[in-house]
Image: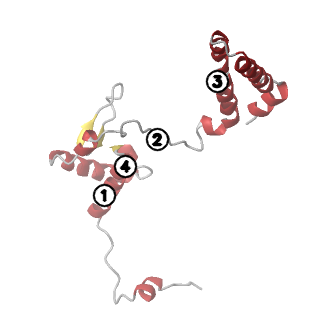
Amino acid sequence: MLKTYELMSRHFGWRRLPRAATERQTLNYLLDRALRAQGIVSLESVCYLDPARKPAMRRLIDSRVRRDELVPVVFPGGEKQVHWTRPETLDTPTTPAGELVYILSPFDPLVIQRKQAARNLALGLASLTVPLIPLLLLSGLIPQTIFVTALAILLFRGLLRPEVEAYLNEA
């Protein structure tokens, strides 16, 4: 027994269903979506997992280049693979002044090995206490020098203990 559902007509109350998108509309949508998501696209990135659409997509890209809606982008060392973008994308600053954004992939080694990265960061921050000790000593701040020296010794001894190192080195 074959089950059929009339959810589209029942939910929307349409007398007849809307027409499906044409191949040209689909290609325009795919190219615009890729440009919106990536900014700079290649033919392979637009037609990912759909190689049958590459010739039609290439014709669409060429027509947009002729109309100056897209400009080719060539990266040094990657002259064989051409990329395209909108002209206004090249004029837009990449990040506002002083603002950096980092997007981490779950497959990024920094995410996978975050304990090791945390240990290295902690050692780096602890090493900032070392130049502070002579500076405090030369300034005549003996109690502060003793405190910072004790803090540095505790930090390094704690971070360099074998069981802490073993814990922070595991994945």
How far apart marks 1 and 3 lie (CA) works out to 51 Å
Q: Nearer the viewer, mark 2 or mark 3?
A: 3
Label number found at residue 27:
1
- Say which amino acid is labelled 3: Gly
Quarter of the picture containing the N terminus is: bottom right
Residue at the (46%, 41%) spot, across then down: 101
Please, what secondary structure does the residue beneath circle 3 have? helix
Residue at the (24%, 45%) spot, across then down: 88
Return the disc, 2 or 4, that comes first in the chain's sequence: 4
Return the disc, 2 or 3, that comes first in the chain's sequence: 2
Locate residue 131: give its quadrant: top right
Q: Nearer the viewer, mark 2 or mark 4?
A: 2
Front-lying residue, 80 or 165: 165
Q: Which residue is mark 4?
A: 46
Residue at the (63%, 21%) spot, across then down: 128
Please, what secondary structure does the residue beneath circle 2 have? loop
How far apart marks 2 and 3 lie (CA) works out to 22 Å
Please, what secondary structure does the residue beneath circle 1 have? helix
- Say which amino acid is labelled 2: Val
Label number found at residue 101:
2
Q: Residue pushed farthest left?
A: 67
How far apart marks 1 and 4 lie (CA) works out to 9 Å
Q: Nearer the viewer, mark 1 or mark 2?
A: 2
